Amino acid sequence: MLRNAKIGFVFQFHQLLPEFTVLENVKLPNMIGLEQRFQPTQLSERCMELIELVGLGGKEHRLPSQLSGGERQRVGVARALVNNPKIVFADEPSGNLDVDTSSSLHQLFLNLNKDRGVTFVIATHKESMCGISNRVVALKEGRCEVKPLV
């Protein structure tokens, strides 16, 4: 319950349920557990806001099979945010995205951090992520090293 209420997850391979629409996939974390954080009408409004935020307005009734890989990943981001988590763990969130979509996703993460105080812990191989991060911890040969920001 704690994980579902306070932590969001963005998986490398989005992990959407194929028989559910975009809107239903985004709603899922709120529907799991003993205590739903939003009433049904509020939840639909919240999910639609997030779907718009990630650039998928108008696609809320599509199935994952009707979306591109980048669109599926953005559904995963919206789903991770639905319960207003304080922290989001993201595993290669832009690994399968084109440069423009990747850049807009990174900007979204920055905005959410600045405007809503959401902390993002991102596992990535993309050096470009280091330039937008507040802190970089690198794993090299089994050791952690905090890299200075330039």
Image: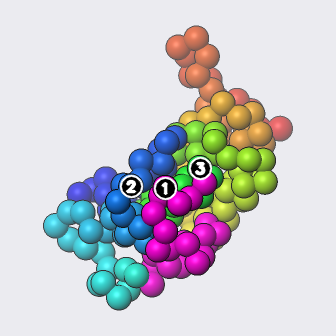
Distance in Å between CA atoms under marks 2 and 1: 7 Å
- Is disc 1 surrounded by few (<14), some (14 to 19) or many (20+) residues within 10 Å? few
**Crowding at mark 3 (Cα within 10 Å: few <14, some 14-19, many 20+):** some
User: For the point 47% across and 58% down, which residue is it?
Assistant: 64
Residue 2 coordinates in the image, percent (x, y):
27, 56
Residue drawn at (52%, 45%) of the image:
90
Question: Could you say which quadrant of the image residue 139 lies in?
Answer: top right
Residue 65's disc is 1
Q: Is residue 41 above or below residue 7?
A: below
To which residue does mark 2 refer? 18
Q: Amino acid at mark 3?
A: Gly
Are the two marked residues, 2 and 3, in contact with CB atoms closer than 8 angstroms? no
Magenta span covers which residues? 45-68
Q: Quadrant of residue 148?
A: top right
| Residue 91 position (above or below residue 143) | below
User: The residue under label 1 is which amino acid type?
Assistant: Ser
Q: Residue furthest top?
A: 141
Q: Secondary structure at mark 1?
A: helix
How many numbered markers are drawn?
Answer: 3
Residue type indicated by callout 2: Pro
Q: Residue 134: x and y, percent? A: 68, 47
